């Protein structure tokens, strides 16, 4: 069998229709995903959405109730066929949320442990542990006991321990949630560089959309045990296919109105104030008179400091509350028909509470979502 | 701290010093005098000479050590295995099994022991009768009245159960991602247990072992019951026999006790230091508590734990209850072996009602002290800046070092040597003092653990909201500590109801709680009546444990709201 050919063709990981039931409730429900060689794949979702359980199913720490999990085409878990490879035989590396650094061992011993388990020769172990530690720039701490490490150091040790045996897939469970904000940015960059350098495949779980968007090659948004959408970060951010993904990724501002006219190229929505909003991306299912949400990401709204004559896609409003954040302002704006928008205002102009504004919504940045009633 | 604030701690300190330290000093002092209490003292080394010259003393000390070490070595291995199964695996029915281990832990020693006498008596033991009915087996294979019989009796009467009960929480506090990290690194369940779980849990195992060893060295009633017939003495039975023989030799008993205390103190000091150091270790906030999947080993593991419960509880208790209805304890060959006579005899016994009353009084009295006084001591040690809190801590530890029988002797000396205390001699009040001192260490430790888990800012917030220290203690700290108080109260009650060694030398003929009455019947070979009393003690302790569990559950629900 030609190993190179098959591994180039088969994805690293295939998760097919996997479900997990805890106490009668499906925590993971018919999840399908695929990870190609050398990519970072992220599961993003609020806590309790099933993303960590999915990761643990892949690792073999939980047994699925249905579906199958394949690593490089080999079945790891397939309850229907009675297959359940225990975690220590799956050859995956995992970084735990708590980092799980064994407190009774030094940094060196922690990283050497998986090699000893694989009966690597002692001299070889020394070299490979050293390599792994220098990869995460921790060589100088090799003899330090586990409990005397800072959060960032613990994460590096956990990473070195998971990488030292060149696993087929690296699993990361909320890898940055125990770090402070500054360290989090730095470690994200380091992780991405490291992954590019080693060309290792990664499955990461996080509840932090910024981490997910910043690190992923592809990602999936999960909620209530199901995958809502899979795609590149840009696809998910700009073209969400459902409300959950739209609201979870980035911020969205919504105005409600009714469809006034549709044609092949545009839909026109009338707000209560009488302002007409035309949208380029069309939804053929919309009909005249239907209630819709006009959704737009706040960064696409252009704000003008004067109350100008009503123009195309323009909405007038008043600054109700103005918060100085540092490099920008956050403003809550009340529109003429008493709807609210929270927008970011830059410091290039003077703003004050009570000021009248004109907001322009570019037609190609708006999405329309039917609302009930 | 103002003088007024120091008043309560100082009173408690003096009280403890008087009750825990003074008897010990008397012991040392009076080991050098040979006249009877109350008469002018005659100073002499005769007591020491008698103690060392008595036949079998070396053998007794050797027995004490070997029995303790062999018992504890077996108990640690089995206890660690059972605790791990209950705390860290998906063993079926783990809640039920854990409750079972709690009950086994609470079970008084003597009733279980009686059950096992019925099973393993060389002549009429049920197991022996079953074994000899098998063709080819002629001699009875089991003899409870032997060295190994004593070891077995220790194992099934709490030596293992106490380890399970103490180690389950320790295993549970272990972050399971430490195990999972090892599994994902390519190490099997067994390898992970050996290389990760065991080293991490080792400090807790050491503390529990050291503690059990101290307790095992103090053991009394098992050796008295089983050893007398087998001619196996340990130091505690030697002391008892020095005093109870005719004529009694109190100086020799005192001298021997002093020697033992000298041996035990370093052990206890070691344990004390170890626990003090360990308290600094903190548990991280984020912790996974998932369990290891046993796979096809689930049911064999279940069988193992159930087997332990059967051997330590179900089987002996079943035979104990059967024994109460037998004309001749253990003899099933009679034409009609069953009778109600024993129950009638026990209940009609002139001593029985008094003994029941004494036991209930002792139990509730001890529980009241454990709930009313011990939290204050723990609070002073953990939360105040009282200058002598270290001394208070040490005094709360000291009784742990003292074998019950020696404490009993020290208190006896204290009562007899102080005219003001004389009227208390052989009353229930002396017994209450003895069992309360015996409960001191465990109770204060339990409260200290609870208190160190209550964040200081909760209390500070209460103080800032207005109100005195006492008000904050009552409104904030007490409610938080209520579950611990229920637990300590139950332990205190059970301890008082089952304790033999701490009161054996203090009780008079008028004040004999059920546990002593039972021991008297056993020593006089009246196993049938003794079994009846055993059943009553078991019912009493189980009843209290059960009621407290219900109260505890309701408190738990209140807290979660």
Image: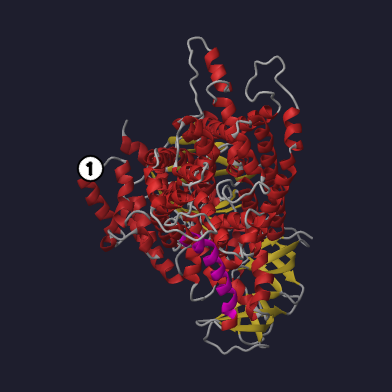
For this orientation, the residue located farthest to the left is A123
Residue B72 found in image quarter: top left
The stretch of residues the image draws in magenta is: B5-25
For this orientation, the residue located farthest to the top is B135
B185 lies left or right of B471: left
| Residue corresponding to mark 1 | A121
Residue A293 found in image quarter: bottom right
Q: Residue at x 64, y 66 (%)?
A: A279
Q: Residue at x 55, y 74 (%)?
A: B10
Q: Is residue B488 visible?
A: no
Q: Quadrant of the C terminus of chain A?
A: bottom right
Q: Quadrant of the N terminus of chain A?
A: top left
For label 1, the crowd category at 10 Å Cα-Cα, with few meaning under 14, some 14 to 19 and many 20 or more, is few
Q: Is residue A82 visible?
A: yes
- Asked if the stretch drawn in magenta spans residue B21, the answer is yes
Q: Position of residue B56 (x, y in %)?
A: 39, 38
- The front one of A286 and A263 is A286
- Asked if the stretch drawn in magenta spans residue B282, the answer is no
* Secondary structure mostly seen in the magenta stretch: helix
The correct choice, above or below, for B439 with respect to A338 in the image is: above
Chain to which mark 1 belongs: A
- The front one of A58 and B491 is B491
């Amino acid at each position: 069998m030609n190993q190179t050919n098959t591994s180039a063709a088969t994805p690293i990981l295939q998760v097919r229709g996997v479900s997990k039931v805890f106490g009668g409730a499906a925590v993971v429900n018919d999840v399908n995903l695929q990870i190609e060689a050398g990519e970072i794949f992220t599961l993003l979702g609020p806590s309790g959405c099933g993303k960590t359980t999915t990761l643990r199913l892949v690792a073999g720490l939980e047994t699925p109730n249905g579906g199958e999990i394949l690593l490089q085409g080999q079945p790891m878990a397939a309850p229907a066929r009675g297959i359940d490879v225990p975690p220590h035989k799956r050859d995956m590396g995992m970084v735990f949320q708590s980092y799980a650094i064994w407190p009774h061992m030094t940094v060196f011993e922690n990283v050497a442990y998986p090699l000893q388990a694989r009966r690597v020769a002692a001299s070889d172990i020394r070299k490979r542990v050293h390599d792994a530690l220098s990869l995460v720039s921790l060589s100088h701490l090799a003899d330090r006991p586990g409990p005397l490490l800072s959060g960032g150091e613990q994460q590096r040790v956990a990473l070195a321990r998971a990488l030292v045996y060149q696993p087929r897939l690296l699993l990361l469970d909320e890898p940055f949630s125990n770090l402070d904000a500054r360290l989090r940015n730095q470690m994200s960059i380091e992780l991405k560089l490291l992954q590019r350098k080693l060309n290792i495949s990664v499955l990461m779980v996080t509840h932090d959309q910024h981490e997910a968007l910043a690190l992923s090659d592809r990602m999936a948004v999960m909620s209530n045990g199901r995958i809502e959408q899979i795609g590149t970060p840009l696809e998910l951010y700009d073209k969400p296919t459902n409300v959950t993904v739209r609201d979870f990724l980035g911020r969205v501002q919504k105005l409600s109105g009714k469809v006034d006219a549709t044609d092949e190229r545009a839909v026109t929505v009338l707000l209560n104030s009488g302002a007409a909003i035309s949208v380029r991306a069309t939804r053929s299912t919309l009909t005249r008179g239907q209630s819709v949400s006009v959704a737009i990401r706040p960064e696409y709204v252009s704000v003008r400091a004067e109350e100008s004559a009503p123009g195309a896609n323009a909405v007038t409003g008043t600054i109700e509350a103005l918060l100085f954040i540092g490099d920008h302002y956050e403003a809550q704006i009340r529109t003429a028909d008493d709807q609210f928008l929270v927008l970011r205002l830059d410091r290039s102009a003077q703003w004050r509470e009570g000021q009248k504004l004109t907001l322009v919504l570019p037609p190609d940045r708006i999405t329309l979502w039917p609302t009930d009633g | 701290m103002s003088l007024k604030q120091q008043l309560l701690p100082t009173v408690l300190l003096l009280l403890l010093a008087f009750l825990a330290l003074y008897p010990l000093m008397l012991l040392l002092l009076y080991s050098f005098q040979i006249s009877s209490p109350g008469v002018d003292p005659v100073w002499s080394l005769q007591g020491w000479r008698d103690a060392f010259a008595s036949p079998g003393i070396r053998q007794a000390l050797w027995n004490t050590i070997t029995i303790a070490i062999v018992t504890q070595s077996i108990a640690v291995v089995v206890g660690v295995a059972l605790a791990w199964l209950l705390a860290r695996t998906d063993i079926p029915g783990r809640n039920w099994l854990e409750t079972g281990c709690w009950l086994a832990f609470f079970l008084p020693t003597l009733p279980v022991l009686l059950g096992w006498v019925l099973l393993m008596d060389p002549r009429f033991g049920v197991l022996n009768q079953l074994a000899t009915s098998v063709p080819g087996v002629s001699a009875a294979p089991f003899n409870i009245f032997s060295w190994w019989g004593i070891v077995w009796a220790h194992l099934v009467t709490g030596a293992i159960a106490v380890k399970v009960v103490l180690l389950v929480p320790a295993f549970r506090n272990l972050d399971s991602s430490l195990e999972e990290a090892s599994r994902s690194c390519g190490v099997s369940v067994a390898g992970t247990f050996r290389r990760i779980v065991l080293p991490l849990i080792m400090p807790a195992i050491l503390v529990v072992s050291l503690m059990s060893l101290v307790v095992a060295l103090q053991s009394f009633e098992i050796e008295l019951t089983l050893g007398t017939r087998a001619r196996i003495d340990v130091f505690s039975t030697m002391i008892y026999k020095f005093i109870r023989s005719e004529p009694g030799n109190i100086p020799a008993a005192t001298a021997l006790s002093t020697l033992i205390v000298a041996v035990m103190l370093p052990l206890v000091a070691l344990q004390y230091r170890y626990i003090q150091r360990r308290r600094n270790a903190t548990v991280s906030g984020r912790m996974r508590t998932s369990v290891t999947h046993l796979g096809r080993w689930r049911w064999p593991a279940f069988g193992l734990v159930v087997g332990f419960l059967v051997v330590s509880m179900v089987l002996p208790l079943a035979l104990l209850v059967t024994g109460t209805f037998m004309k001749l304890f253990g003899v099933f060959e009679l034409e009609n072996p069953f009778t109600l006579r024993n129950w009638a005899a026990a209940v009609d016994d002139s001593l029985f009602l008094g003994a029941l009353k004494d036991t209930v009084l002792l139990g509730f009295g001890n529980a009241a002290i454990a709930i009313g006084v011990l939290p204050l001591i723990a609070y002073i040690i953990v939360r105040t800046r009282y200058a002598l809190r270290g001394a208070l801590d040490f005094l709360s530890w000291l009784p742990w070092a003292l074998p019950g029988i020696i404490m009993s002797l020290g208190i006896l000396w204290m009562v007899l040597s102080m005219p003001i205390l004389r009227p208390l001699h052989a009353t229930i009040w002396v017994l209450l003092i003895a069992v309360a001192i015996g409960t001191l260490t465990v109770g204060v430790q339990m409260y200290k653990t609870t208190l160190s888990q209550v964040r200081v800012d909760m209390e500070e917030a209460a103080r800032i909201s207005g109100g005195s220290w006492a008000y904050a203690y009552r409104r904030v700290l007490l409610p938080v500590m209520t579950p611990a108080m229920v637990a300590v109260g139950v332990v205190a009650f059970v301890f008082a109801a089952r304790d033999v060694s701490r009161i054996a030398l203090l009780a008079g003929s008028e004040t004999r709680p059920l546990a002593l009455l039972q021991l008297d019947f056993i020593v006089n070979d009246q196993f049938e009546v003794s079994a009846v009393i055993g059943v009553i003690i078991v019912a009493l302790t189980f009843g209290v444990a059960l009621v407290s569990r219900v109260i505890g559950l309701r408190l738990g629900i209140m807290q979660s709201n």
